[in-house]
Image: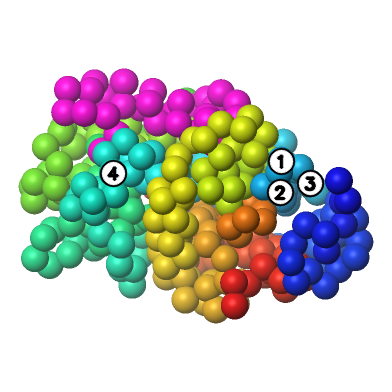
Amino acid sequence: PNHNVCSIVKGSKFRLPIPDHLQLVLNSCNEDNPGKNADYIPELRDADSNRLGVAVSTVDGFVYTAGDVDIPFSIQSISKAFVYALAIEEHGLDYVLTRVGVEPSGEAFNELSLEQDTCRPLNPMINAGAITTHTLIGKADTSYEERFEKIRKGLSKFAGRELEVDENVYNSEMKHAFRNLAIANMLRNYNVFDLDPKKVVEGYTRQCAVLVTAKDLAVMAATLANTGIQPVTGEQVVRPQTVRQTLSVMMTCGMYDGAGDWVTKIGFPAKSGVAGGIIGALPGQVGISTFSPKLDKHGNSVRGVRICQRLSDDMGLHIM
Ligand code: DON
């Protein structure tokens, strides 16, 4: 293949080979390191905030990287997008829509944000929606362990390798999960689901504690960019209609309160996580990931957003 940026992405202004270009982008986004690590658990508070990585995977499975792309970190909220896709795949979109909406909440990700008349969580990218989506994996008689294992296996198919849980992150998160437990209890109160709220939060928290690298996230994102076909293994992980739904919700709700800014400035579907990861996917072209632990006030990685902005400008990734 021709490893020039311009040859893989339509509208790209740059002619440098991709790896050199990615290194330049990292350097230009690394002049300072504002924001702060998530600090509600020691594992995230003490994570090395100098880490910085970027990975780009083409839809034909070439992965280009610069910086810290092999450092494992917890997937956190980025899992919400993939588990939403797995839920649609398992139950069909019509059913999933009866349980979780698709409207931006305009509130923080950890607000309850239920629709007035139906009590559906507004969208699957906020915690209330993601906790509900978690319960949609499997059937009524699926055990909590089986449900989590289905999710772990599903995420692993997107990554093209077996992903594992960081037990320390999981245990720490559970010591501080008061708010998610409250949300899950409210959801149970409104009969949004009828499972045990504590068990559900344990499963959702394990889902968030799955370890990935920036390289993993780039191919996971590229699977979404590639109509659900994992570009390296060739496996159809989810169907094209499922991908369309998932990317649409990422576009409107993926970056929390920062979504409007994100869509206008950067312009491709994305999802962030509190450990400092961001994924982006441009259908038919590339999956992108960034890793940098310090977050802005919305909970999005500061240097990650910068890198995405720069890549969007240089490579013409804005959909408009
Ligand atoms: O649900 C939580 O609070 C975390 N385990 C994950 C949240 C998250 O990643 C928010 N992202 N910026």
**Labels in figure, total:** 4
**For the residue carrying disc 1, how many other residues have a C-alpha within 10 Å: few (<14), some (14-19), or many (20+)?**
many
- Any mark on residue 64, and which? 3
Q: Position of residue 268 (x, y in %)?
A: 57, 66
Name the residue rendered at 54%, 72% in the picture.
Answer: 262
The residue lying toward the viewer, choosing from 174 and 287, is 287
**For the residue carrying disc 3, how many other residues have a C-alpha within 10 Å: few (<14), some (14-19), or many (20+)?**
many
Tell whether 177 sits left or right of 264. Answer: left
**For the residue carrying disc 2, how many other residues have a C-alpha within 10 Å: few (<14), some (14-19), or many (20+)?**
many
Q: Quote the CA–CA distance across marks 2 and 3.
A: 8 Å
Q: Quote the CA–CA distance across marks 4 and 2.
A: 28 Å
Question: Helix, strand, or loop for circle 1?
Answer: loop
Residue wearing tag 4 = 92
The residue lying toward the viewer, choosing from 149 and 58, is 58
Vertical comparison of 246 with 158: above or below: below
Q: CB under 8 Å between callouts 4 and 3?
A: no
- Any mark on residue 28, and which? none
Name the residue rendered at 87%, 51% in the picture.
Answer: 3
Q: CB under 8 Å between callouts 1 and 2?
A: yes
Name the residue rendered at 46%, 26% in the picture.
Answer: 153
The residue lying toward the viewer, choosing from 214 and 236, is 236
The residue stretch that appears in magenta: 136-165
What amino acid is labelled 4 in the image?
Gly
Q: CB under 8 Å between callouts 3 and 1?
A: no
Q: Quote the CA–CA distance across marks 1 and 4.
A: 28 Å
| First along the sequence among labels 2 and 3 | 2
- Any mark on residue 58, and which? 2
Residue wearing tag 1 = 61
What amino acid is labelled 1 in the image?
Gly
